Image: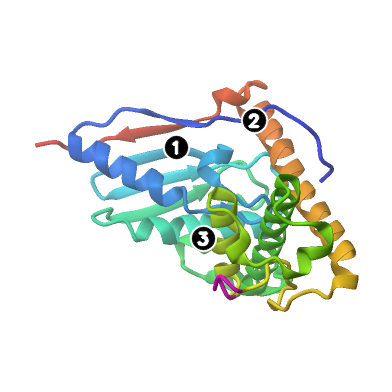
Amino acid sequence: MSAVATPTASPTARGRTSARHGASLANDVIAALSTVMDPELDEPVTELGFVRSVALHPSGLTVHLRLPTSFCSPNFAYLMVSDAQDALRRVRGIGEVTVLLDDHHDSDKINAGIAADAGYLGTFGAEAEESLDALRLTFLRKAHTAAMERCVMAALTSGSVLQEDLGRLTLRDLPAGRTKEALLRRRTDIGLGVAPSEPVVVDERGVGVPDEELPLRLRLARSVRISIEGNAHFCRGLLATRYADGDATGITTHITDTRSTS
């Protein structure tokens, strides 16, 4: 996708809960869903507005997910639905979990595969281009590259490091904060070290980049970061056009609780 600037969505949860326990469980559900990331955009599905509804009922819950278009990549869609199901099954006392993808050209296939616990290859069969683990790793590495570039640019902008010294920049040198925390999470996700002495600018194996290769490596990292951020803005705009008449702030998650309070 090309990078297109659009309004940033501010999805909120609204609805009714019938008891204090219901409200607490609903909060636990949203917290679990907030750990599910769009693999390409590297943002939680809750913040992107992809969670359409959450319905708590006597036997468990049903969650409906939605995407910006009906033709979003099926493998990305499957990853999010599968990850949502896994995250929700870890919520204590949740009961039966049903996660459904709405309005996608492969909704029926994905929903059937998820319901049957068929796995990615079992769901798509010969259509599956690669294993789910390989696909996930590809996007985790991209997320790490973007997080690395953000830390490097912050260090350069603050003047805490010079361009010619970037090869010696270590995790210890980065100031505490969300930018560094994001980098440490991404390094952990792909199995890289997070010791204070580890170099910041590394390749996908965690090996430091030679000084002569740093400019090219950072240019490539910047293009990855810009692509991820641009696509996120673009997808928010598409979702708002599809579901909220172009109003990005109207993308909400509807929560209902029909369980008995007696």
Compute the Cα span from label 3 to label 2. Answer: 26 Å
Q: State the mark number for residue 178.
A: none
Callout 3 touching callout 2 (CB < 8 Å) = no
Quadrant that contains the C terminus: top left
**Image quarter for residue 165?**
bottom right
- Report whether residue 111 is seen: no
Residue denoted by label 2: 8
Residue denoted by label 1: 53
Callout 1 touching callout 3 (CB < 8 Å) = no
- Report whether residue 222 is seen: yes
Q: Secondary structure at mark 1?
A: strand
In-image side of 88 versus 211 (left or right): left
Q: Give the label, 2 or 1, closer to the camera.
A: 2
Say which label, 3 or 2, has the lower sequence index: 2
- Up the image or down, 235 lies above or below 213; here it is above
Measured from the top left, where is residue 18 in percent x and y? 21, 31
- Residue at 66% x, 60% y is 75
Measured from the top left, where is residue 225 in percent x and y? 75, 51
User: Which residue type carries mark 3?
Assistant: Ser
Q: State the mark number for residue 82.
A: 3
- Up the image or down, 157 lies above or below 74; here it is above
Measured from the top left, where is residue 88 in percent x and y? 38, 55
Q: Which residues are magenta?
A: 193-197
Say which label, 2 or 1, has the lower sequence index: 2
- The stretch drawn in magenta includes residue 3: no
In-image side of 166 versus 61 (left or right): right
